[in-house]
Image (cartoon, grey):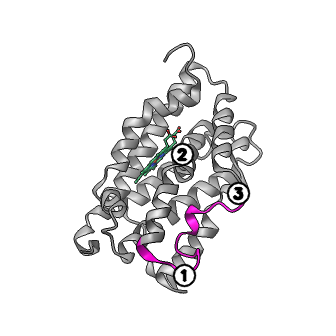
């Protein structure tokens, strides 16, 4: 860490290799290449659902926590939009159609395990939401093109109608990270948890990737 590096910079730089690993999974590579069927895309949406249910429950439980509360914002909540997408992708009885994979259950268990540690919650919060506001927007464009949904149902997860300026929101989010004023030990713990959050996400994607032979379209 250099003297001028903020915590937000430090967090990003220290975990960017983990980001690359997630981004380079065979599944995301195929998805970004427009080679995944609608069914294969739906699988990722379903796995997201379980993780966000856990993450957003943890957020609600920490809503009055002085450290975590600045990160908990209603505009970010993804469960309602995931429900819209799942209904579009699986039909009205989507709840009976989806199942969490083993890596998803492991990821959810970790979110639940750290739910009373504000720093750990922030690590998982950052990994998902800042990603959805960044690379997620690239994924959205590809998904819109690949599946031609008639309305936003199907890609609602990637839309943040209550955040007027995503770029500004991300700048503000990084300021919130910097305002945590973590000491070195705390900062290291949050960085390590973020690396773990990436790894758990990667494992979820690797598992979906095992079904690529079924999901690949010509
Ligand atoms: C096709 C897949 C992906 C692409 C193309 C992608 C691309 C990007 C891009 C372009 C940025 C912005 C970098 C910047 O502002 O300098 C970003 C940031 C980010 N992405 Fe991804 N990403 C992908 C997958 C993921 C996944 C799977 C996760 C998490 C599980 C993730 C988490 C993040 C996070 C947390 C940031 C914010 C980094 C920071 O500014 O601190 N991304 N991504």
In this rendering, position of residue 169 left or right of residue 13: right
In this rendering, position of residue 204 left or right of residue 88: left
Q: Is residue 170 magenta?
A: no
Alpha carbon separation for disc pair 2 and 3:
17 Å
Q: Quadrant of residue 160?
A: bottom right
Question: Of the residues under marks 2 and 1, which one precedes in the sequence?
Answer: 2
Question: Of the residues under marks 2 and 3, which one precedes in the sequence?
Answer: 3
Q: Residues within 10 Å of mark 2 (few under 14, many from 20)?
A: many
Alpha carbon separation for disc pair 2 and 1:
32 Å
Q: Disc 2 vs disc 1: which is toward the camera?
A: 1
In this rendering, position of residue 97 left or right of residue 132: left
| Image disc number at residue 150 | 1
User: Is any atom of residue 108 visible in this view?
Assistant: no
Q: Is residue 155 magenta?
A: yes
Q: State the quadrant of the C terminus.
A: bottom left
| Image disc number at residue 96 | none
Q: Disc 1 vs disc 3: which is toward the camera?
A: 1
Question: Of the residues under marks 1 and 3, which one precedes in the sequence?
Answer: 3
Query: Pointer 1 and pointer 3: residues touching (CB < 8 Å)?
Result: no
Residue that sits furthest to the top in the current view: 3
Q: Secondary structure at mark 1?
A: loop
Q: Disc 2 vs disc 3: which is toward the camera?
A: 3
Q: Nearer the viewer, residue 150 or 12?
A: 150
Alpha carbon separation for disc pair 1 and 3:
24 Å
For mark 2, what is the residue? 124
Magenta-tinted stretch: 146-162
| Image disc number at residue 75 | 3
Residue drawn 51% across the image and 31% down it: 11
Question: Relative to residue 12, is residue 217 depicted above or below?
Answer: below
Q: Residues within 10 Å of mark 3 (few under 14, many from 20)?
A: few
């Amino acid at each position: 860490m250099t003297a001028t590096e903020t915590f937000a910079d430090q967090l990003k730089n220290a975990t960017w290799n983990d980001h690359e690993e997630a981004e380079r999974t065979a599944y995301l590579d195929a998805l970004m290449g427009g080679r995944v069927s609608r069914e294969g895309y739906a699988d990722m949406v379903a796995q997201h659902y379980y993780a966000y249910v856990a993450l957003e429950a943890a957020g609600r439980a920490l809503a009055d926590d002085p450290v975590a509360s600045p990160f908990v914002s209603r505009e970010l909540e993804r469960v309602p939009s995931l429900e819209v997408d799942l209904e579009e992708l699986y039909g009205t009885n989507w709840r009976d159609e989806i199942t969490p994979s083993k890596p998803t259950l492991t990821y959810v268990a970790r979110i639940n395990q750290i739910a009373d540690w504000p720093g750990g919650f922030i690590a998982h919060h950052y990994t998902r939401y800042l990603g959805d506001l960044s690379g997620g927007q690239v994924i959205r464009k590809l998904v819109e093109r690949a599946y031609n949904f008639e309305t936003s149902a199907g890609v609602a997860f990637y839309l943040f109608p209550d955040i007027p300026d995503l770029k500004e929101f991300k700048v503000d989010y990084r300021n919130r990270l910097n305002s945590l004023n973590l000491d070195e030990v705390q900062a290291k713990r949050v960085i390590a948890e973020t690396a773990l959050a990436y790894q758990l996400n990667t494992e979820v994607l690797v598992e979906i990737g095992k079904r690529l032979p079924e999901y690949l379209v010509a």
